[in-house]
Image (cartoon, rainbow, N blue to C red):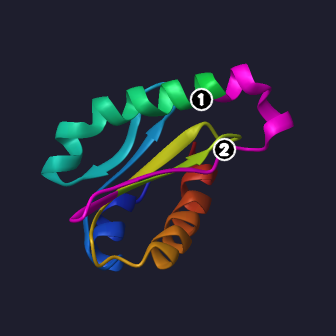
């Protein structure tokens, strides 16, 4: 698989970290020191989010798409690809364009989905 993390770090403005991770915990691609430090906590959040989704009735409530957390200085954008069983994490500075970041993560998801 091409290194999606390196590609994301080059192509997405204001990004400081990226990870693509299977729901089972297998890391597909990762970049950024802070991302490596917080990834286990992010995996716990995603696991809990998916558990809540199951309890609420799965497809009856729609397909999970993202978890967005932000402060005045950083944004954590977690995009979930439920049917392919992986998620992407983008750690962004406050000036990041979320629309563009979502678009790029979607483009990367197509490549990842073919490989997993």
* Magenta stretch in the rendered image: 53-75
Q: Please tell me how crowded label 1 is: few (under 14), some (14-19), or many (20+) other residues with Cα within 10 Å.
A: some
Closest to the observer, 54 or 72 = 72
Question: Where in the figure is residue 75, as x and y percent of width and height?
Answer: 32, 60
115 in the magenta segment: no
**For the residue labelled by badge 1, is the local secondary structure a helix, a strand or a loop?**
helix
Q: Is residue 99 left or right of residue 38?
A: right
Vertical relation: 67 (above or below) 57: below
Quarter location, residue 13 = bottom left
For image coordinates 48% across by 78% down, the residue present is 100
- Front residue of 31/76: it is 76
Q: Residues within 10 Å of mark 2 (few under 14, many from 20)?
A: some
Q: Residue at x 56, y 69 (%)?
A: 107
- Residue extending farthest to the right is 60
**Residue 68 seen in the figure:** yes
The answer to whether residue 15 is left or right of residue 99 is left
Observer able to see residue 3? no
The tally of labels here is 2
Which residue is pictured at 19% across the width and 54% down the height? 32
Q: Which residue is mark 2?
A: 64
How far from the left and from the top, in percent, is residue 105?
50, 64
Marks 1 and 2 close (CB-CB < 8 Å): yes
The residue that label 1 is drawn on is 50
Q: Position of residue 34 (x, y in %)?
A: 16, 48
Q: Which is more N-terminal, label 2 or label 1?
A: 1
Q: Secondary structure at mark 2?
A: loop
Alpha-carbon span between mark 1 and mark 2: 8 Å
């Amino acid at each position: 698989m091409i290194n999606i993390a390196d590609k994301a770090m080059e192509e997405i403005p204001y990004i400081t970290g990226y990870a693509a991770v299977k729901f089972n915990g297998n890391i597909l691609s990762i970049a950024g020191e802070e991302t490596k430090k917080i990834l286990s906590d992010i995996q716990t959040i995603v696991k809990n989010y998916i558990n809540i989704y199951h309890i609420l009735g799965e497809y009856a409530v729609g397909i999970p798409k993202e978890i967005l957390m932000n402060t005045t200085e950083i944004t954590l954008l977690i995009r979930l690809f439920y049917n392919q069983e992986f998620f992407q994490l983008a750690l962004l500075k406050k000036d990041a364009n979320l629309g563009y970041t979502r678009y790029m993560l979607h483009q990367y998801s197509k490549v990842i989905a073919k490989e997993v």
